[in-house]
Image (spheres, rainbow, N blue to C red):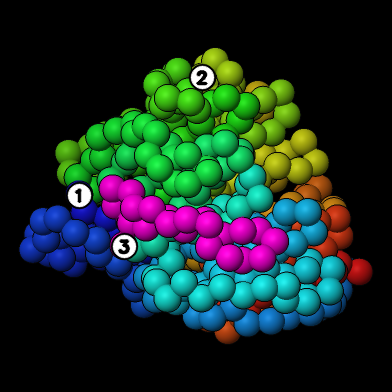
Amino acid sequence: MLKITAWWRALPLVALMLLLGGCSMGIFDFMRDKKEREPDDLADFDSEVRLRRNWSMNVGSGQGDKFNRLKPALDNGIIYASANNGLVVAVEAETGKRLWRADLDVEISGGVGVGGGMVLVGTEGAAVYALDAQSGEQRWQTTVSSEVLSSPASDGRFVVVQSVDGRITGLDAANGSLLWTYENPVPALSLRGTSSPLIIGNAVLSAQAGGSVVSLALDNGTLRWEERVAIPTGNSDIDRLVDIDGELVVGDNNLLLVPSYQGYLSAIDSNTGQTRWRVEESSDVGAGFGFGNIYVVSEDDTVKAWRVGQDAPQWSNDQMTWRQLSSPTGFSNYLAVGDAEGYVHLLAQSDGRFVARIKADGDGVRAHMLAQGNTLFVYGNSGDLASYTAQ
């Protein structure tokens, strides 16, 4: 299996094929060729909102240099964040006070997951660590089939981990012992990244590199349903590349929102697996909800607002193309996206106009941002974790 990052799409096709021609199995990262795909300049606008920084702190090496998307987690007023160099921290969301710090001395590539009183991370070496959410002490550590690039999930009874070889593994939350494994074929070529599994009731929802979504029984991993959201087409492996790397989100009426690369943006009934609505939309990052809209960042970094059942977007903002945007986060009346230069852009959820902008991290903002009320939490690529309030 050859894993590449979505940044390959900005490279000249001939150069890319020369690179691929000398490769067989393994993981390769291709950065954007900025000379080929120059990002949009920052658009001028009249600020309507001020983002005030409440606190900030550094979390180790942050994302590292392999295009990880280590996203923090917010649970019961506490933010849990991890860094590629093995650091995991718990921070009081309101004050920024660090509650505990754990140094695992490993290369973390997937996380953070929170559930059942545990903080969960996965590593490049296929290890999964469970830490006590209150103290940071290690509860257990186990090994799965391959590198973990997404956040493990837990309901307190089970831990579910998705690894880059397509396997979904169910573990006993008490001690990390193996309970079951579900295997799904992985295409020869896919984006570097893995969508995180979701636990909804007694089911596991998981997006696959081949462009499908599956629902598994939580207790034994048997298949409940499978729905395809992207179909490979074309003659070359590049043309046939489909993937789902964005985070799955369950919104109103149990609708599962699934963005896919070179496929569709789909709304699927999480109970039955039936597609209720879909539009052609290519995205390699997650989507979000807010104001009755579905927000998605397209392949070229156009931000769009859709509504289930409609065949045209409510609005579209194309003034940030090729800025390598993060997944969108809705909070209060606003929609936040980060970019590769470290800016956080605030858009009005009503019509997509710019209302504010800040420079949050000089190395860029790739991880999904968190929101609580009128507060936005940003984890920059360099490891800067900060809290901002919209005023």
Q: Secondary structure at mark 2?
A: loop
Q: Nearer the viewer, residue 245 or 281?
A: 245
Q: What type is the residue that disc 1 sits on?
A: Met
Q: Secondary structure at mark 3?
A: loop
- Is 251 situated left or right of 175 in this image? right
Identify the residue at image location x=61%, y=40%.
Answer: 156
Tell me the tag on residue 1: 1
Chain-order first, disc 2 or disc 3 = 3
Does the magenta segment cover residue 220?
A: no
Q: Read off the magenta span.
A: 125-147
Q: What type is the residue that disc 2 sits on?
A: Gly
- Is 106 situated left or right of 41 in this image? left
Considering every residue shown, the one lying at the far right of the view is 391
Q: Are marks 2 and 3 in contact (CB under 8 Å)?
A: no
Indicate the position of residue 265 as horizontal and vertical percent values: 52, 36
Query: For mark 3, does the 10 Å Cα neighbourhood hold few (<14), some (14 to 19), or many (20 or more) residues?
Result: some
Q: What type is the residue that disc 3 sits on?
A: Gly
Quarter of the rendering containing residue 29: bottom left
Residue ID for mark 3:
125
Indicate the position of residue 105 as horizontal and vertical percent values: 42, 76
Q: Secondary structure at mark 1?
A: loop
Q: How many marks?
A: 3
Q: Is residue 119 above or below residue 227?
A: below
Whole-angstrom CA distance, mark 2 to mark 1, is: 28 Å
- Is 2 situated left or right of 118 in this image? left
Quarter placement of the C terminus = bottom right
Residue ID for mark 2:
273
Query: For mark 2, does the 10 Å Cα neighbourhood hold few (<14), some (14 to 19), or many (20 or more) residues?
Result: some
Whole-angstrom CA distance, mark 1 to mark 3, is: 17 Å
